[in-house]
Image: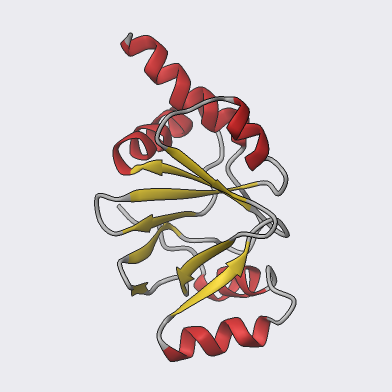
C-alpha cells in the first residue's frame, strides 16, 4: 500500500538535494524522472522487494521511522533513503543482494505521486526530512534473517 503525504512539501524537499533544484523540476516536467544527487540530504540502501517489504513491516512493528522508499519496477528493488554518510556503514553489515548510493552517486526517481519508467514512491517523502535509520534497517533485515536460520 502506498502512503501519500503532502506531495508539495516532499517534492520541495527532494529538489533541495540538488544545487540546481530548477533543473530537477524541469526534468520531472520533461520525461518525468530526474537524477538526484545522493550524499547531500540522503544516502540510499537498496534491497530486494521481498526483503525490503519484510524490513518495512519489522520497522513498523518496532515503532521505528520509515522514511521515503522508492520502488523500482514492481517486484524489483526497494530503495530506502537513509541519513547522509550512513550508506558506507551498510557495507560493513555485509548484507547480500543489497546496494548503496552515497556521495557521487545519483538516485533516478519520479516526482512524488508519479510513476515513471517503472519507478514509484512506495513511501513518498513528506518534506519533514525523516529518513530510515540505517542501524534500525540492519536489525530489521539481519535480525529477520538470523531468526530464519
Residue 107 sits above or below residue 35 on the image: above
Residue at 44% from the left image edge and 27% from the top image edge: 141
All told, the count of numbered labels is 0
Q: Quadrant of residue 145?
A: top left
Q: Quadrant of residue 32?
A: bottom left
Residue 81, percent from left and from top: 56, 51
Residue 80, percent from left and from top: 50, 48
Residue 37, percent from left and from top: 64, 65
In-image side of 94 versus 2 (left or right): right
In-image side of 32 versus 45 (left or right): left
Residue 39, percent from left and from top: 69, 55
* Residue 63 or residue 86, whichever sits in front: 86
Residue 82 sits above or below residue 125 on the image: above
- Where does the C terminus fall, quadrant-wise? top left
Residue at 67% from the left image edge and 81% from the top image edge: 21
Q: How is the image coloured?
A: secondary structure
Residue 21 sits above or below residue 10 on the image: below
Residue at 69% from the left image edge and 73% from the top image edge: 18
* Residue 2 or residue 54, whichever sits in front: 54
Residue at 48% from the left image edge and 67% from the top image edge: 108
Amino acid at each position: 500500500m502506498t502512503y501519500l503525504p503532502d506531495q508539495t512539501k516532499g517534492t520541495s524537499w527532494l529538489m533541495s538535494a540538488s544545487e540546481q533544484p530548477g533543473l530537477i523540476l524541469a526534468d520531472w516536467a520533461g520525461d518525468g524522472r530526474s537524477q538526484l544527487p545522493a550524499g547531500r540530504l540522503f544516502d540510499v540502501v537498496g534491497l530486494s522487494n521481498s526483503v525490503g517489504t519484510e524490513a518495512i513491516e519489522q520497522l513498523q512493528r518496532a515503532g521505528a521511522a520509515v522514511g521515503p522508499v522508492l520502488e523500482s519496477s514492481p517486484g524489483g528493488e526497494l530503495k530506502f533513503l537513509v541519513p547522509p554518510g550512513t550508506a558506507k556503514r551498510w557495507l560493513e553489515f555485509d548484507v547480500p543482494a543489497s546496494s548503496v548510493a552515497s556521495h557521487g552517486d545519483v538516485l533516478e526517481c519520479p516526482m512524488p505521486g508519479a510513476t515513471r519508467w517503472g519507478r514509484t514512491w512506495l513511501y513518498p517523502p513528506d518534506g519533514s526530512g525523516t529518513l530510515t535509520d540505517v542501524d534500525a534497517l540492519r536489525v530489521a533485515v539481519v535480525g529477520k534473517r538470523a531468526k530464519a536460520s
